[in-house]
Amino acid sequence: MEPNKFSDNSLSTQIAKKITQQIISGELQPGEKLSEYMYADEFGTSRAPVREALYLLTIEGLVERIPRKGALVKGYSPSEIFDLLEIRTMLEELAMKRIKERGVQSISLERMNLLLDKMYEEEDSKAYTHLNHDFHMCLIEMSGSEIISKMYERLEMPLLSIQNMSFSASGNIEKSIKEHKLLLQLLQENQVEVALELLNKHNRDVIESIQKQIKDKQK
């Protein structure tokens, strides 16, 4: 599934999509330098569209420019990673509270059900990460809050990069599918408070999984 942040088909957007996929999949690692010449050669273009693509990715928080070093894949410290995940948890909790106030939307449930079917079939962690994000985005949209939606959308690219780390661990996709299935069932039964408890536990487990992976890498 292609990232949906970049909606047009310009050359700079195509390059940005390519780099995004490489970052999310782990093909490009934090701190790795991005060569304008390499991408210009790959896409048969000048360096101008590559620079535009890197600018777009800088805005999205996937790339950073360092003086005398150029454009690098942005790395997040453990504290920054946990801040992002905690903010995501808080926004989703607020969204669920709005859903309780305004009611569960059947259109969103239908889309979540379709996404769940695709999640059952997906074995690739990168593709599953996108499906997972789309599923959670349905909750955000169901809240009916434009402010919550906009704030959540700003987290999209960093979250995709971080969450792919979690889903690459053995057993995490299977666990995720079971919890998403139960969450959808609870919402269909209008048990929003119970669904919120499950969602909070699900998000805490994601944080703990990533904490463990970071610690293991530091050994």
Image (tube, grey):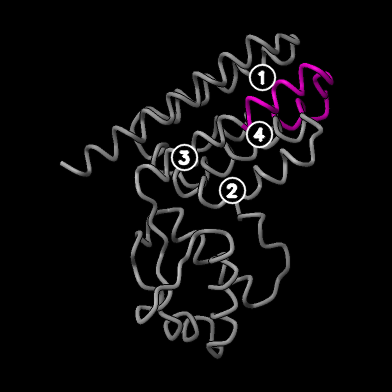
Q: Position of residue 144 (x, y in %)?
A: 81, 32
Q: Earlier in the sequence, mark 2 or mark 1?
A: 2
Q: How far, Cα to Cα, is label 1 from label 3?
A: 26 Å
Q: Earlier in the sequence, mark 4 or mark 2?
A: 4
Q: Residue at x 33, y 34 (%)?
A: 211
Q: Earlier in the sequence, mark 1 or mark 3?
A: 3
Q: Is residue 137 above or below residue 179?
A: below
Q: Is residue 15 above or below residue 219?
A: below
Q: How far, Cα to Cα, is label 4 from label 2?
A: 17 Å
Q: Position of residue 88 (x, y in %)?
A: 56, 36
Q: How far, Cα to Cα, is label 4 from label 1?
A: 11 Å
Residue 134, quarter of picture: top right
Which label number is shown at residue 79? Answer: none
Q: Secondary structure at mark 2?
A: helix
Q: Nearer the viewer, mark 2 or mark 1?
A: 2
Q: Which residues are magenta?
A: 91-112
Residue 172, quarter of picture: top left
Q: How far, Cα to Cα, is label 2 from label 3?
A: 14 Å
Q: Which residue is mark 4?
A: 115
Q: Nearer the viewer, residue 153 or 163?
A: 153
Q: Which residue is mark 1?
A: 184
Q: Position of residue 185 (x, y in %)?
A: 67, 14
Tell me the amino acid under the disc marked 2. Glu
Q: Nearer the viewer, mark 1 or mark 3?
A: 3
Please, what is the dominant secondary structure of the magenta stretch? helix
Tell me the amino acid under the disc marked 4. Leu
